[in-house]
């Protein structure tokens, strides 16, 4: 009986979510607005624009309430755009699923899967931990260093999936109980925070990164290379590691300074690892080739007279793995690790974002909501962009969803007021993946949370402070690098 009541309640909640989404759509469609609001600095909101914003708000309610999976909501939004005559179905699908961002993401996820299955990620982690010794604070720092090193190249989610079992093993060996051990809480949160921090370092690190690059290319006509992203991302990653370590130690002071396991035992764990296999060697070679092409795509493309970009090396990486004799892991095994729902969500997000942009609604919304930051001093403007997005992420519950909504608006705002597009968009891009507060914001957090060592409240308490700290660090990091590179 209890199960049936829960099912009825859940079903009722899902129906209510859809009714609420429809109500929000109708409200945006028919709310009376004065001419002064409908026309702002030359940007006008017409009926097609209203419909596109209404559908975006409709999807937003479903994304927050989640009566259906995220990517299904994306498809519903595309169909709704088609039936509301915002754009044709073929064009909407072409803009999203025909975007080269999608194949880039598939290539990166393939690399992540192979690195995980061959054991290279674990080998790197065990090696670094063998150097930290048995000090609990140093082990915590070690995880916060390994996480970014992995996630810059293989997605934050995959890095967390490698670190979490290692952390659980340490905690179980030390008989530290879930929910009771402060060190357990700090270490498992570090398994999420480290990869999240590293995820902003390169375009390959997190789902919102290639999504943002795709929007910047499609809307502003600006191609951001792998190296360009790293110029802004890497310094921010480095500057965030120590503050995150300090925050975790302040909130969850370890109950003992040293583990029972000695430094020699941890070094022996590394020595006991089997020799590097043929699969690992080939994977390292393919990774180095891919990384070289990502980093050198600009000048190499100039020499060859072709545009390489970030997607082509990712596809080459996928192809190289499947050449005869390269690795023993089959495509069937690899594709099990690929987040296909994440890929679908990114594609749908691009379709919806470009649809709103093409109607002119993105420009109108940007001026309505963010016009005030345009005339601020550069430093204050960067901080406000980062702070606003940090707040929005708490409500939107998904980094990719937030990127789909925010990035087109930011690009239009910069274009309308003749501001440097990268100067507005880069602060937004780097903030999108830093989901320190809510477990539900990203699968990376969910992986660590599934260990059972910390509560949602534990992450939220420490996450609020870390979010405030990250806002300040990103502001000054982006400002000074922007001054050096000339975008401010």
Image: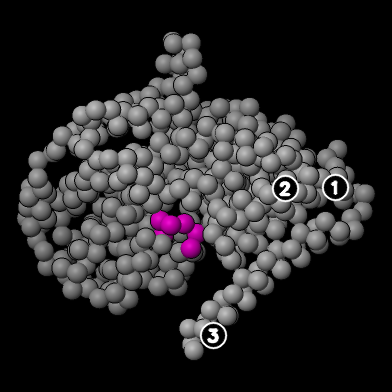
Q: Quick check: 432 above or below 27?
A: above
Quarter of the image where one finds residue 44: top right
Circle 1 residue = 47
Q: Within the magenta stretch, is there residue 462?
A: no
**How busy is the neighbourhood of tag 1: few (under 14 within 10 Å), some, or many (20 plus)?**
some
Please provide percent x and percent y for residue 369. Answer: 74, 51
User: Separation of disc 3 and disc 2 at Cα?
Assistant: 36 Å
Q: Nearer the viewer, residue 434 or 59?
A: 59
6 w.r.t. 118: above or below: below
Within 10 Å of the Cα at label 3, are there few (<14), some (14-19), or many (20+) other Cα atoms? few
Q: Which residues are magenta?
A: 440-445
442 within the magenta span: yes
Q: For the residue carrying disc 2, how many other residues have a C-alpha within 10 Å: few (<14), some (14-19), or many (20+)? A: many
Above or below 144: residue 255: below
Rendered residue at 47%/67% (across/down): 460
Q: Residue at x 46, y 30 (%)?
A: 311
Residue drawn at (32%, 71%) of the image: 453
Q: Which mark is residue 5?
A: 3
């Amino acid at each position: 009986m209890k199960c049936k009541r829960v099912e009825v309640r859940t079903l009722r909640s899902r129906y209510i979510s859809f009714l609420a989404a429809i109500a929000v759509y109708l409200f945006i469609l028919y709310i009376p607005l004065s001419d002064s609001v409908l026309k702002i600095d030359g940007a006008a909101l017409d009926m097609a624009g209203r419909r596109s914003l209404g559908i975006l708000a409709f999807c937003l309610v479903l994304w927050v309430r989640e009566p259906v999976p995220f990517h299904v909501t994306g498809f519903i939004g595309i169909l709704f755009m088609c039936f509301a005559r915002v754009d044709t179905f073929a064009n909407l699908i072409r803009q999203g699923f025909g975007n080269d961002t999608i194949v880039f993401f598939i290539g990166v996820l393939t690399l992540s899967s192979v690195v995980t299955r061959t054991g290279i990620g674990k080998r790197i982690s065990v090696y670094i931990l063998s150097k930290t010794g048995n000090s609990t604070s140093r082990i915590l720092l070690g995880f916060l260093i390994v996480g970014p090193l992995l996630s810059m190249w293989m997605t934050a989610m995959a890095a967390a999936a490698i670190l979490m079992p290692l952390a659980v093993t340490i905690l179980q060996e030390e008989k530290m109980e879930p929910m009771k051990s402060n060190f357990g809480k700090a270490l498992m949160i570090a398994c999420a925070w480290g990869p999240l921090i590293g995820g902003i370092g390169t375009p390959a690190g997190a789902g919102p990164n290639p999504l943002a690059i795709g929007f910047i290319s499609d809307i502003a006509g600006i191609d951001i290379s792998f190296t360009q992203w790293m110029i802004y991302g890497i310094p921010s990653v480095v500057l965030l590691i120590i503050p995150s370590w300090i925050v975790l130690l302040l909130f969850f002071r370890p109950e003992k300074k040293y583990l029972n396991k000695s430094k020699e035992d941890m070094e022996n764990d590394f020595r006991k690892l089997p020799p590097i296999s043929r699969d690992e060697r080939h994977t390292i070679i393919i990774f180095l080739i891919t990384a070289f092409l990502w980093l050198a795509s600009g000048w190499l493309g100039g020499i060859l007279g072709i545009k390489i970009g970030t997607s082509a090396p990712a596809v080459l990486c996928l192809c190289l793995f499947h050449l005869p004799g390269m690795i023993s892991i089959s495509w069937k095994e690899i594709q099990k690790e690929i987040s296909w729902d994440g890929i679908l969500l990114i594609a749908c997000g691009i379709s919806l974002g470009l649809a709103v942009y093409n109607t002119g609604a993105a420009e109108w919304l940007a001026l309505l909501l963010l016009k005030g930051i345009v005339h601020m001093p550069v430093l204050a403007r960067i901080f406000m962009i980062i702070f606003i997005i940090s707040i929005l992420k708490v409500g939107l519950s998904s980094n990719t969803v937030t990127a789909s909504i925010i990035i087109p608006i930011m690009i239009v705002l910069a274009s309308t007021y003749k501001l440097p597009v990268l100067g507005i968009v880069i602060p937004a891009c780097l903030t999108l993946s830093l989901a320190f507060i809510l477990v539900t914001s990203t699968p990376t957090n969910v992986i660590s949370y599934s260990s059972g060592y910390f509560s949602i409240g534990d992450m939220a308490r420490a996450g609020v402070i870390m979010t405030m700290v990250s806002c300040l660090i990103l502001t000054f990091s982006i400002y000074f690098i922007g001054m050096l590179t000339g975008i401010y």
